[in-house]
Amino acid sequence: MLIWGTVQVRNYEKDNERKWITEVIAENFQLLDKIKRKKEGEMDLHFDEIEKMEVVNK
């Protein structure tokens, strides 16, 4: 899966303990081909469906 967006990190305090939250704010996503393995432990990623990636700035 390929995700376009931002990562947001925030924190708060609960019961005198600081808690952290990390969120992925997705603007768009694309499902990719499966990972094809060359040898045990090695991976060859195939992103044949991705022709052009555009970054959208807000």
Image: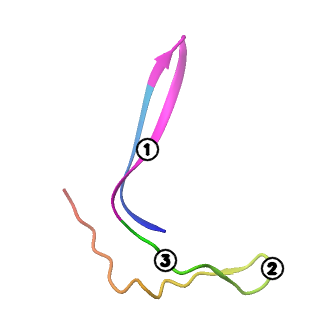
Q: Establish if 25 lies above or below 11.
A: below
Residue matched to label 3: 32
Residue matched to label 1: 23
The foreground one among 31 and 11 is: 31
> 10 Å neighbourhood of mark 2: few (<14), some, or many (≥20)?
few
Q: Which of marks 1 and 2 is nearer the N terminus?
A: 1
- Residue 19 at x, y percent in the picture: 52, 26
Q: Is residue 11 magenta?
A: no
Q: Give the range drawn in magenta.
A: 12-28
Judged from the image, the secondary structure of the residue bearing numbered disc 2 is: loop
- Residue 10 at x, y percent in the picture: 41, 33
Prevailing secondary structure of the magenta residues: strand
At label 2, which amino acid type do we have? Glu
Left or right of residue 51: residue 44: right
Q: Residue at x 47, y 88 (%)?
A: 48
- Which dot marks residue 40? 2
Q: Residue at x 49, y 68 (%)?
A: 1
At label 1, which amino acid type do we have? Glu
At label 3, which amino acid type do we have? Leu
